[in-house]
Amino acid sequence: MKKQSKWTALDIAGMGIMLAILEVCKHALDFLPNIELVSFLFIIFTLYFGWQIVLLSWAFSLVECIYFGFGPWTITYFYVWPILIILVMVLKRFGEERPLFYAILSGAFGLSFGFLCSLYTLVVGGIGMQLTWWISGIPYDLVHCVGNFVICLVLFYPINRAMKQLKI
């Protein structure tokens, strides 16, 4: 996808393919608690396609809502994934192509995922509800952290290399 003001059919098709990859990878690992490829894929896609991946994250969130139904968690996906994308865009000049840098970022994102998702409970039920909800999920956040770190560390180099070979 080229940096231009108007989207081409190729840009739209590319977004559709990336959305399909996100969905397939997410559902392929649904049986594992908090182990997912979505964070890693958003990092890689953001490095190559920049800010327009925010739109992809919203499309992904919408598809998830259609698949699983709308609920309180719906709101969180619409702001949590863009936070990761913003972090990648802001920090990419420091990370360049270092897998360890992005593995740490991905792990930190996994660790903070529960807190970020608990922000809506602050509005709904106050600080007590938010802290209770967040603290009860910390074991899952730890698994999410380790999973994200390992996945990114293992997959960053080969996927980054493949993206370069595709000359994206």
Image (spheres, helix red, strand yellow):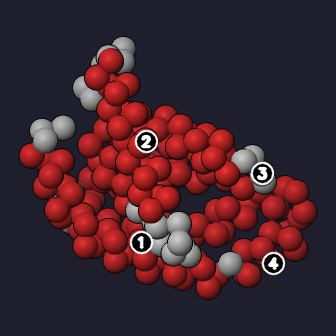
Crowding around mark 3 (Cα neighbors within 10 Å: few <14, some 14 to 19, many 20+) is: few
Q: Which element carries disc 4, helix, strand or loop?
A: helix
Q: Which element carries disc 3, helix, strand or loop?
A: loop
Residue plotted at (47% across, 50% down): 23
Numbered disc in front, either 1 or 4: 1
Q: Quadrant of residue 156?
A: bottom left
The residue pinned by badge 1 equals 148
Crowding around mark 4 (Cα neighbors within 10 Å: few <14, some 14 to 19, many 20+) is: few
Q: Are marks 4 and 2 in contact (CB under 8 Å)?
A: no
- Horizontally, residue 60 falls left or right of residue 50, namely right
Give x and y (percent) for residue 139: 62, 85
The residue pinned by badge 4 equals 132
Amino acid type at mark 2: Leu
Precedes in sequence: disc 1 or disc 4: 4
Residue plotted at (19% across, 55% down): 160
Residue plotted at (54% across, 82% down): 142
Q: Are marks 2 and 1 in contact (CB under 8 Å)?
A: no
Crowding around mark 2 (Cα neighbors within 10 Å: few <14, some 14 to 19, many 20+) is: some
The residue pinned by badge 3 equals 71
Precedes in sequence: disc 2 or disc 3: 2
- Horizontally, residue 48 falls left or right of residue 79, namely left
Amino acid type at mark 3: Gly
The residue pinned by badge 2 equals 19
Residue situated furthest left in the rendering: 165
Cα distance between the residues tagged 1 and 4? 24 Å
